[in-house]
Amino acid sequence: MKHIAPLLLASALIAGVSGCHSGGAYRPVNTTKYDLENTEPLVLLDKGAQRSVTASGIQKRVNEDGRMEVIANLRNRENRRIQVQVNCVFKDEQGFPTGDETPFRNVFLDENAQEAVRFVSMNDQARKFTIRVRQAR
């Protein structure tokens, strides 16, 4: 019985020191782990798109009226016809969305074929963009 009290005290001290955070703020963790939409011009939103689609080139330009135009050359990497959905999120200079996001649209890619997909922003605030590709459901 005399030996149990020190063991309980030691256990309580270890639990108090190592495990319990009693309040205050926490630092964010893994802040860049799933951050591709903030750093890449093209993101593939699921495993099927990752396996089947790549972009052989992306062009951007600003039209005379100040709106951004983006053209992505999507390529089917498979030996079968596939259907994907593609949209574009236009962003300002700092990378924040301008509220100008196109709806997802269906794109059919023949076997090992390429298809150009064009997007134009609705306003002149866009300076950056992210093209998002997912499998059609």
Image (cartoon, rainbow, N blue to C red):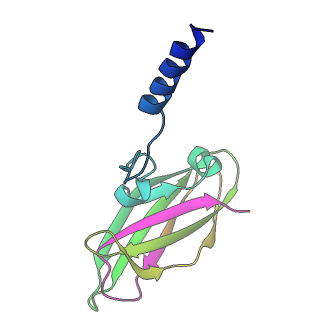
Residue occupying the point 55% across, 19% down: 8
In the image, residue 127 lies in the stretch drawn in magenta: yes
Front residue of 52/91: it is: 91
Left or right of residue 85: residue 129: left
- The residue at the far front in this view is 2
Q: Is residue 31 above or below residue 97?
A: above
Residue occupying the point 48% across, 56% down: 43
Q: Is residue 13 above or below residue 48?
A: above
- The residue at the far right in this view is 137
- The residue at the far bottom in this view is 65
Front residue of 114/70: it is: 70
In the image, residue 46 lies in the stretch drawn in magenta: no
Question: Could you say where residue 12 lies in the image, as x and y percent from the top left?
Answer: 51, 26
| Quarter of the N terminus within the rendering | top right
Question: Could you say where residue 110 lies in the image, as x and y percent from the top left?
Answer: 65, 57
Left or right of residue 69: residue 44: right
Residue occupying the point 50% across, 21% down: 9
Q: Is residue 13 above or below residue 125?
A: above
Count of number-bearing discs: 0
Question: Could you say where residue 130 lies in the image, as x and y percent from the top left?
Answer: 42, 65
Residue 92 in which image quadrant:
bottom left
Residue 60 in which image quadrant:
bottom left
Range of magenta residues:
118-136
Question: Could you say where residue 5 lies in the image, as x and y percent from the top left?
Answer: 55, 16
Front residue of 16/75: it is: 16
Left or right of residue 128: residue 30: right
| Quarter of the C terminus within the rendering | bottom right
